[in-house]
Amino acid sequence: MSAPSNLLRLLPLQLEDLPSHPALKLSVDQKGDGSTGDASVTQVRSTDPHKTTQTLNASQPDAPEANTRPPIGPFIKAILDSAVIFIDDTLPTTFQHHSHKSSTSAKTNVELLQHMVSAKELSKVDWQGSKIPRHPPDNLASEAWFARRSRHANKQAKGTASFSEFDYGLRIDHCQHEDAYTPEVFDTRRVLEWDIPDSLAKVDSDFADYQNITMSILVITATTGEHDFIIVQLPVEIGTVQEAFYSNGRNLQEGNSALKRKKPVMGQYTSIERCVLRPIANEIEWTMATTSDAKGWLPIWMQNLGIPGAIAKDVDFLMDWIASVRRGRQRDLKET
């Protein structure tokens, strides 16, 4: 089994950990060396603390003065490689079965799994010697990971969806669609974004396995073949970024509703999601793993009690939303 990743952690990335972006100009007081850089961010606000996240979309080569920042290509590839290894290797060998949940909207059963990453195991993480180094945490705390796996018939029919519908609902415009199908999410805002050239795989052979890459702070999505895609969400500390909305408190004055003007509690959320079409069985395997900390007043052990049930409900939410989108498209076709 591979060593634990230093990137797929609950510990938030700091601004200096990100590739260059004009909006991420760090003062000497913030970073200590006067370097500047680029980045892209999306904030997703939710009444469910486990859905409070931020996202990133990526490209643009580093500016010469920002040579302390990771180059955009290796940064994205390191995260995507770690995510694929996590789903294909770490999850099957370390996660234990938790339970099964029957789905009300999807014609499938959802398997739930769990795995506790101890502080001792996290002490083995090579924080600064990895391809993308980052500062180690001052205090190591265990991470409670939960996962779900479900299989769906690959067809446009009640209770299931085709692979293209899964791709549209989950990978394309991920945060906006998550806002649409998840009841607890009440706002999504793009803070920063990197433009990733379509030619990246052509000019860098290391990217031969990845296409259609997007990155936000921090959400990274990519296809890994004709019938395979992956989504990674990582927490990022963006409280000093002017373009942020909730993290820097702008919402307290600029929010357009009482809910959006509430003082937020900034939780932490990490997730890895992968959909693969299995041609022989003509079914889609949808796997998601997550670890989170809502902060606030609820102890984390109590938060963890509700996570398996919460992530199982996401399967129903997506199936219901895809069905509504499908009905809308059928109405449009009839009207034309």
Image: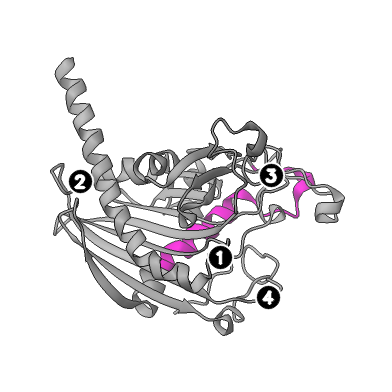
Q: Position of residue 165 (x, y in %)?
A: 26, 42
Compared across the picture, whether 107 is left or right of 37 comes to left
Q: Amino acid at mark 3?
A: Asn
Work out how far the residue at label 2 is from the one at label 4, CA to CA, in angstroms: 44 Å
Work out how far the residue at label 1 is from the one at label 3, CA to CA, in angstroms: 20 Å
Q: Which residue is mark 3?
A: 248
Badge 3 element: loop
Q: Nearer the viewer, mark 4 or mark 3?
A: 3
Q: Which residues are magenta?
A: 61-86
Residue drawn at the location 16% of the way across and 41% of the way down: 156
Work out how far the residue at label 1 is from the one at label 4, CA to CA, in angstroms: 12 Å
Q: Which residue is mark 2?
A: 161
Q: Amino acid at mark 4?
A: Asn
Badge 4 element: loop
Badge 2 element: loop
Identify the image quadrant of residue 139.
bottom right
Q: Which residue is mark 4?
A: 139
Disc 4 packing (10 Å; few <14; some 14–19; many ≥20) = few
Q: Nearer the viewer, mark 2 or mark 4?
A: 4
Q: Amino acid at mark 1?
A: Leu
From this viewpoint, is residue 316 visible?
yes
Q: Amino acid at mark 2?
A: Ala
Please say if the residues under marks 1 and 2 sit with CB atoms less than 8 Å apart.
Answer: no
Disc 2 packing (10 Å; few <14; some 14–19; many ≥20) = many
Compared across the picture, whether 44 is left or right of 242 comes to left
Which mark is first along the chain, 2 or 1? 1
